[in-house]
Image (cartoon, rainbow, N blue to C red):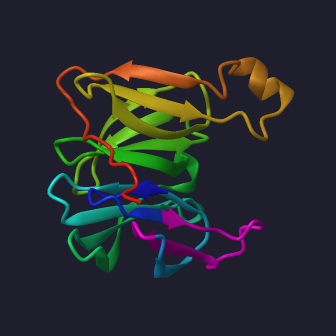
Amino acid sequence: GKCDRMGRLWIGSLDMATAANRGNLFRVDADGSWKKMDTGFTVANGLGWSPDNKLMYFTDSMRRTIYVYDFDLHAGEISNRRALITLDASDGTPDGLTVDQDGCLWVAIWDAWRVSRFSADGEEMLRIKMPVPRPTSCCFGGENLDTLYVTSASVRLNVEALAAAPQSGSLFAIRTPGIRGLPETIFAG
């Protein structure tokens, strides 16, 4: 889950057996009330918003697709879901994401040893090689929001894979000179 800039919490769900189309996207308001916003996902994942709050991004990892919605910040409504980025099966799986001040998406690519930066149009602009195969998510932090923090997983890696990537499960900090992130918002409730 992640909060939009009004402090509403958006949460994606999935079937624990990863049954297709059983996942949903929910919005939780400050008073604790919730609403199902969209449905038909398999492995709900990364969330983010454009700097102008007109777009919302949402990942279905099983489909290897990052969707974009039109977003109404004040109403907390989404519409017009469409695929923005779809990765080939040989290119890894999009996982968690964040958005920088230029409107570019930074995406942790599971089983691909990297984080990628995509333009707002979905074109890959940059790849940052990671010392682990399973980066899981990322966000900007630090005093100037110019450090990209990347989480990673060690789950379901065999002994050989862990020997090849002993830092799996670690948190990484990557300086991004000239690129700044957007501040994250906490829950309003």
Of residues 145 and 45, the one nearer the viewer is 145
Identify the residue at horizontal 20%, vertical 72% (top origin). 74
- Measuring from the top left, give residue 186's x and y in whole percent: 38, 49
> Quadrant of residue 78 in the image?
bottom left
Of residues 46 and 182, the one nearer the viewer is 182
- Measuring from the top left, give residue 72's x and y in whole percent: 22, 73
In the image, is residue 27 part of the stretch drawn in magenta?
yes
Q: In the rendered view, tell whether residue 22 sits above or below residue 13.
A: below
Q: Which residues are magenta?
A: 11-31
Dominant secondary-structure state across the stretch colored magenta: loop
Identify the residue at horizontal 43%, vertical 21% (top origin). 173
Identify the residue at horizontal 30%, vertical 64% (top origin). 56
Viewer can see residue 66: no
Viewer can see residue 13: yes
Q: In the rendered view, tell whether residue 176 sits above or below residue 20.
A: above
In the image, is residue 107 part of the stretch drawn in magenta?
no
Count up the numbered dots.
0
